[in-house]
Amino acid sequence: MRDPMGSVKDVVVEKKPTETEFGEGYFEFRSDYSVFDYGAMPDQIPGKGEALCRMSAFNFTELAKLGLKSHFLDFIKPNRLKIKLVRVLYPGKDEITTETSNYLIPLEIIFRNSLPSGSSVFRALESGERTIHDFGLDHMPKPGEKLEKPIIDITTKLEVSDRRINWDEAKQFSALTDEEVERIKEIALKVNDFITKRAEEIGLEHADGKVELAFGPDREILLVDACGTPDENRFLLNGFHISKQILRDYYRKTPWYVKFEEAKKGLPKEQWPAPEKLPEELVNAAGDMYKAVCEMWTGEKVWGASLQDSISGVRGFL
C-alpha cells in the first residue's frame, strides 16, 4: 500500500504496525518540494529525492554509532529507505495517553544554533507570538546572530498548520512524561551536535534544523522521518543559504506570495492560489546544489556536481 508522506516522499506499507509490533515498509523520496505549508509545488528539482535519501541513510547510520536509535533499516538505491513503521495517532481524539506505545510523537523538535535572515523566530518576535524569554534569549536578536548555546523550539504535527507551542503544551498534546520531555531534549541536542560537526567538516555552517520522533512498542524514543538534509536543516556557506530556503526566498519576491499569505488567513486549503513554475535555470541550479551537498556530506561521488557553480546559478534569481 502506497500513501503520500508529506509533500516530498511516499511511504509504502508492507506490514502494518500494531500497538505491540513495528510495521515494515519503505520511504520513496520524490524530487518534489514544499514551502510555506502549501504542499507540493509545481516543479521537480532533479536529483533532490535521491540526495535527501542518501544523506538520511548516512546520518541514521552514523547516529546509530552514537547510540541514537531510529526507524532506519537499510538504504535501497537510488531513493528508498527501508524502515520500521509506527502508528499515526491524532492528538485531540483520545487516542494517546502516557501508556500508549508504537506511535509517531506529533511534534517537530527544532534546534537553533544561529538566527539567519528568514528564521521564523523573527516573525514570532515581531508579531508578539513569542517573547525573547520564550526562546531563552536576553536581548532582541539580529539576523545572522550566532547563539552562545543552541535553543530548542517545538511545533505541532498532524494539524492543518503547524503551531509553535511550549513544553507544558507539548506534554499534554503528545502525552509525554517529564522524563520523556528531558529525553527528547537530549536526543535533539545530540543530533544537532552531530549535524553541526559534520557540516563544519565540509565547510558549512549549520544554522538550524529539526527532528521527528516516535515511541516504539516498548515506548522507547526513536528518530524517524528524514534527518540532517537541506530540507530539514538550514546550512550556509559564507552567509549564503544551502537549503530549500533559496526557494522560499525566490517565491517571497513574487506576487503569488502576497496572495497566498492573504488566502491562508481565511480560505480553505483547496482555495489557496496556485504558484507559478520556477525558471528552468533555477530548477537545474537548485538540483545541482542538492547533489553537491549530498556528495560532500556522504563522501560518495554520484553526479560530480559543483557547489560553487550551483550557488552562482541560484544567486542570479535571489
Image (cartoon, rainbow, N blue to C red):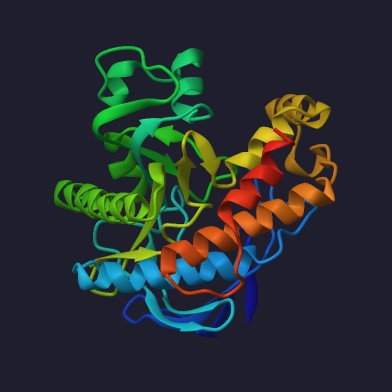
Question: Whole-percent x and y of residue 248?
Answer: 65, 38
Q: Answer with left or right where residue 184 lies relative to residue 255.
A: left
Which quarter of the rendered picture does the N terminus lie within? bottom right
When asked about the image quadrant of residue 167, the answer is top left
Q: Is residue 7 visible?
A: no
Which quarter of the rendered picture does the C terminus lie within? top right
Given residues 277 and 259, the one toward you in this image is 277
What residue is at 71 percent from the left and 27 percent from the top?
A: 261
Give above or below for 29 relative to 178. below
Q: Answer with left or right where residue 316 lies relative to residue 234.
A: right
Question: Whole-percent x and y of residue 127?
Answer: 51, 15
Give above or below for 316 relative to 10. above
| Name of the residue lying farthest toward the bottom | 14
Question: Whole-percent x and y of residue 241?
Answer: 54, 40
Given residues 239 and 11, the one toward you in this image is 239
Given residues 276 and 99, the one toward you in this image is 276
Q: Answer with left or right where residue 1 lies relative to residue 173.
A: right
Question: Whole-percent x and y of residue 9?
Answer: 61, 66
What residue is at 49 percent from the left and 14 percent from the top?
A: 126
